[in-house]
Image (spheres, grey):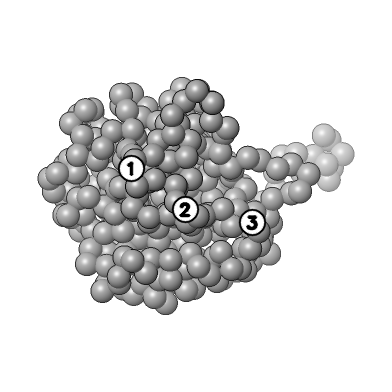
Amino acid sequence: MPLATASAAVAPARARPVASQRAGAGADRRARLIRRPARSPVPTRATSPAAADPAANADGMYDGTVFFHLYPELKSPKPIFSTFLEGALHCCEVARSHPDYCSAHFHEAIDQDDAIDCKPHGYFNMTLFKCPPAELFERFEDLHECLDIGHMDQIHHPLPCQEVAAIPGPTSAIARVPHGVVRYSERDAVVMVATPRGNNGLDARDWRAWSGADVAAEKAAETFLGASLHRCVDDAAAFEHVVRIELGACDAGAVDACVARARSECGDGAVVGGFRCAFNIEKTGTPAGAMPAVREMQKKKKEAEAAGGVSVADAGKKTGQV
């Protein structure tokens, strides 16, 4: 699918995206995934170096590009890549070479079946660049090519955004720290809300109400970390606003309440779901491509269990051979 800069058109999707649905089963397992053990706290963000300047503009919002990538179609981009994740994380790896790349945060659905089974919107990605959206593709043309290759024959939505509002204020969480030091805990719950172009008549000034952010703050209480509203600068993109809500180490009920409110308020075409940050991809370090192998192992294990099989280790324990 051809892509374009923030100042030009992004190719429209072949079909209008619909709100993602989570399986009703497995609520207990979701609660375990969301809740962080008290004995092993993980900081949500790295501590910023004292000498570095925060990444805030005059309004207290992030001064670069927040690049969201939504995936309503998670089929394999063959023949180059054999799985969706291989293609998506190839894009993440190439993006690291962008001169203004800071970090990427690859999210998977809290209900891991949605991610393992590659259901629509089982994943989304958020990448931070320190350049303004209008310069994002101009400064690194390979970003065009890698998105075309990594998502060949897929419906996907690259959304170059600006952060425009946040709670708690007056400075947003990612703007309070220097570029390149943002990290998220994989144990913290996140709700992502994307509204279609035209915003379904919703007033952006009321984003805390229609996104469920206010409900999340109430239900998650002391674990609530904050929320941000982002405006997509590409007028041809399928989505107009993206809200990312951090509920921290809350229980499943807080996530469900936030998701329910957003789905009831945002209307047709909105994408709403509960997620966690599965992979923090920094400028250097662990290759982004390490994740597909883990996901494929989980998928094969699930298929074996569904077929009534057992692992080699478990079989050995039963027979006394291992």
Splitting the image into 4 quarters, where does residue 186 fall? top right
Q: Which residue is label 1 attached to? A: 58
The reply to whether discs 3 and 2 touch (Cβ–Cβ < 8 Å) is: no
Q: Which residue is label 3 attached to? A: 223
The reply to whether discs 2 and 1 touch (Cβ–Cβ < 8 Å) is: no
Q: Which residue is label 2 attached to? A: 169
The reply to whether discs 3 and 1 touch (Cβ–Cβ < 8 Å) is: no
Depth check: give the residue in front, 229 or 297: 229
Alpha carbon separation for disc pair 3 and 2:
17 Å
Marks 2 and 1, the one that precedes in the sequence: 1
Splitting the image into 4 quarters, where does residue 79 fall? top left
Depth check: give the residue in front, 126 or 208: 208
Which three-letter amino acid code belongs to the residue tagged 1? Ala
What residue is shown at x 74% (from left), y 49% (from top)? 37
Which three-letter amino acid code belongs to the residue tagged 2? Gly
Q: Which label is found at residue 180?
A: none
Which three-letter amino acid code belongs to the residue tagged 3? Thr
Taking 322 as reference, is 302 above or below it? Answer: below
Alpha carbon separation for disc pair 3 and 1:
29 Å
Depth check: give the residue in front, 97 or 204: 204
Marks 3 and 2, the one that precedes in the sequence: 2
